[in-house]
């Protein structure tokens, strides 16, 4: 078991350039409704992890020539999946927790949508010193790749390169969720804070998750012990609890609003139209496909090639599983560094 993590805000004090810096977000409370009857805001203040890169300085400076890389995770994940990638990158990076994941609040489940997620990211981009007023490289894994497509279609002038890691653009039905007997209502009502690991295990099992998947996440540190030292919950201060960076609600709501929609194909076509007007070199588009257990459909990939033409670079990783950045990290890092270098020109 990893050492307990306090729920207080983490410091952004000066650190070595390759060190990870965590945004000052305490673990969020479960959504209990709008703060007032007139509250129409649907933008979540996203938690994130940043690093200046192995060749960076010790200050947050947006004037650096190298673009920052914005990293977006997939389902049942968080910024945690990018830890080693961030510590290995030579250039600055920011990895986000999408709404409902990691340390980011879920917001109102009824207002969950592709547009809402894009607006969350845009708010961070416009405020963060490593991202605002400059083009950046956007990398999205799995569902994060779909989010990356939606963001680039909406704000193409923000993006110098888009890297989609093992995700196509086709529509997927809610019933295509690979977890059998997935209980959507229990998933959406999931509380990420628990009194014990047994409570966490039971909650995931009740939703339909297999036990071996949960044990893997515990071992990886996606679910961990935390100590309360603020007013996040009604438990006594100093109580030892367990927090899950994984949120089944994110899976359920992404399937309902993002996968089971045309936002993928529509976003891809919008990006292709943008490139036709602004030139194929205005945004470098890369599609990475896992050689083992890919989720990419061949027909959808063919459609993506046809729509994007010479503006799309496709590479298959024969030894890579769905999480290419973890399964063949050295090759992934080499390719990503090359994309960043090209985007710097």
Image (tube, rainbow, N blue to C red):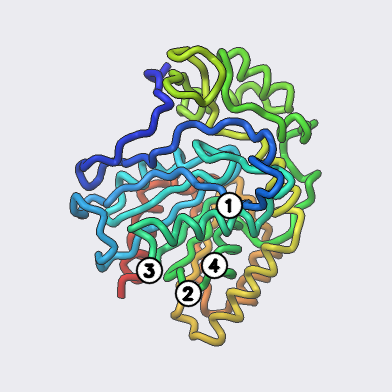
Give x and y (percent) for residue 276: 56, 85
| Residue pointed to by mark 4 | 152
Labels 4 and 3 touching (C-beta < 8 A): no
- Position of residue 176 relative to residue 179, above or below, is below
Give x and y (percent) for residue 222: 50, 30
- Position of residue 303 relative to residue 216, above or below, is below
| Mark whose residue sits in front, 2 or 3 | 3
The CA span between labels 2 and 1 is 21 Å
| Residue pointed to by mark 2 | 157
Residue visible at 49% across and 31% down in the picture: 27
Give x and y (percent) for residue 30: 62, 31
- Position of residue 176 relative to residue 277, above or below, is above
The CA span between labels 4 and 2 is 8 Å
| Mark whose residue sits in front, 4 or 3 | 3
| Residue pointed to by mark 1 | 43
| Mark whose residue sits in front, 2 or 1 | 1
Left or right: where does residue 266 sit relative to residue 230?
right
Foreground residue, 68 or 61? 61
Element carrying mark 2: helix
| Residue pointed to by mark 3 | 133
Quadrant, the C terminus: bottom left
């Amino acid at each position: 078991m990893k050492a307990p993590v306090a729920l207080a805000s983490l410091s952004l004090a000066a650190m070595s350039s390759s060190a990870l810096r965590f945004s000052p977000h305490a673990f969020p409370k479960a959504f209990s409704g709008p703060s007032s009857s007139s509250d129409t805001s649907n933008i979540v203040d996203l938690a994130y992890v940043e690093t200046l890169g192995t060749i960076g300085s010790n200050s947050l400076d947006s004037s650096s020539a190298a673009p920052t890389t914005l990293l977006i995770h997939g389902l049942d994940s968080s910024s945690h999946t990018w830890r080693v990638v961030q510590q290995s990158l030579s250039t600055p990076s920011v990895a986000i927790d999408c709404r409902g994941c990691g340390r980011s609040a879920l917001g109102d489940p009824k207002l969950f949508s592709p547009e809402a997620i894009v607006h969350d990211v845009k708010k961070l981009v416009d405020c963060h010193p490593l991202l605002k007023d400059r083009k950046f490289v956007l990398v999205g894994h799995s569902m994060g790749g779909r989010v990356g497509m939606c963001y680039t279609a909406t704000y193409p002038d923000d993006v110098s390169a888009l890297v989609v890691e093992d995700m196509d653009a086709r529509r997927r039905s809610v019933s295509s969720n690979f977890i059998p007997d997935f209980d959507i209502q229990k998933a959406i009502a999931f509380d990420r804070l628990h009194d014990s690991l047994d409570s966490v295990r039971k909650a995931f099992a009740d939703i339909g998750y297999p036990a071996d998947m949960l044990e893997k996440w515990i071992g990886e540190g996606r679910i961990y012990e935390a100590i309360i030292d603020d007013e996040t919950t009604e438990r006594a201060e100093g109580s030892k609890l367990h927090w899950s960076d994984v949120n089944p609600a994110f899976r359920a709501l992404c399937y309902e609003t993002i996968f089971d929609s045309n936002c993928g194909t529509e976003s891809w076509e919008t990006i292709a139209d943008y490139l036709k007007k602004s030139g194929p070199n205005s945004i470098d588009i890369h599609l990475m496909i896992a050689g083992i257990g890919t989720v990419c459909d061949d027909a959808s990939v063919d459609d993506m090639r046809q729509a994007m033409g010479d503006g799309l670079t496709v590479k298959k990783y024969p030894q890579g599983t769905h999480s290419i950045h973890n399964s063949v990290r050295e090759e992934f890092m080499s390719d990503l560094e090359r994309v960043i270098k090209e985007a710097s020109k």
